[in-house]
Image (cartoon, rainbow, N blue to C red):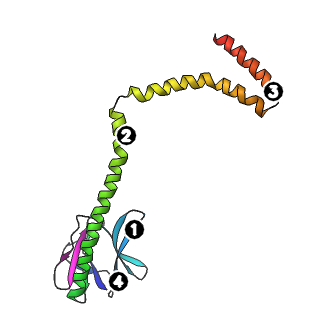
Amino acid sequence: MAHVFQIDPNTKKNWVPTSKHAVTVSYFYDSTRNVYRIISLDGSKAIINSTITPNMTFTKTSQKFGQWADSRANTVYGLGFSSEHHLSKFAEKFQEFKEAARLAKEKSQEKMELTSTPSQESAGGDIQSPLTPESINGTDDERLMPEVMQNSEPRAEPTQNALPFTHRYRFHSHILD
């Protein structure tokens, strides 16, 4: 439990209390975004929703007070604790979650690198090679398509329907020749 403060956006010096009384401040893992957050609710209102980043620092400014800057929220949060022990416990947790955030960030960057490396290689490699097999396959498919259709049609439909198709194909092949 702690009293929550935010830095006055105008003066950037004075603390403005955001909770009327001591509230629970929790660490939370957001599995959908793979990030760690510090969250505090006053009733149903979130008075802290701060994503922990690897470069954040929690600073003890007195025996019972600590603060950290959240650049995304563009504010500085302050927490007033009832004892030095509670402040120390919070600071330890902050370090743990900051480290977890660093590892999570590294993992997601590795994933990014893994997915982006092959595409960079193929773009930087011989551009002709991926295209040639496709164009060869394209012409093969065109040549094979009528034969495949011719073979499969009689099975699917009565023979009379298949015969005109066969004649039509033969007729076309004479034009092509």
Mark 2 and mark 4: Cα distance apart in space: 47 Å
**What residue is disc 4 on?**
24
Magenta highlight range? 56-69
Query: In the rendered image, which quarter contains the N terminus?
Result: bottom left
In x, y percent, where is residue 171? 72, 14
What's the distance in space between the residues labelled 3 and 4, CA to CA? 78 Å
Which callout, 1 or 4, points at the residue further toward the start of the chain? 4
Q: At label 3, which amino acid type do we have? A: Asn
Q: Which mark is residue 30?
A: 1
- Helix, strand or loop at mark 1: strand
Sequence-first tag of 1 and 2: 1
Indicate the quadrant containing the C terminus: top left, top right, bottom left or bottom right.
top right
Residue 119: which numbered mark, if any? 2
Q: Which kind of residue does numbered mark 2 sit on?
A: Ser
Instruction: Decide if residue 120 is on the left or right side of residue 12.
Output: right
For the question of whether residue 49 can be seen, the reply is: no
**Few, some or many C-alpha atoms within 10 Å of disc 4 (few <14, some 14-19, many ≥20)?**
few
Q: Is residue 151 left or right of residue 23?
A: right
159 falls in the magenta region: no
Query: Hey, which residue is sitting farthest left in the picture?
Result: 62
Residue furthest out toward the bottom: 82
Q: Does the residue at mark 3 contact the one at mark 2 (Cβ under 8 Å)?
A: no
SS for dot 4: loop
Magenta residue check for 68: yes
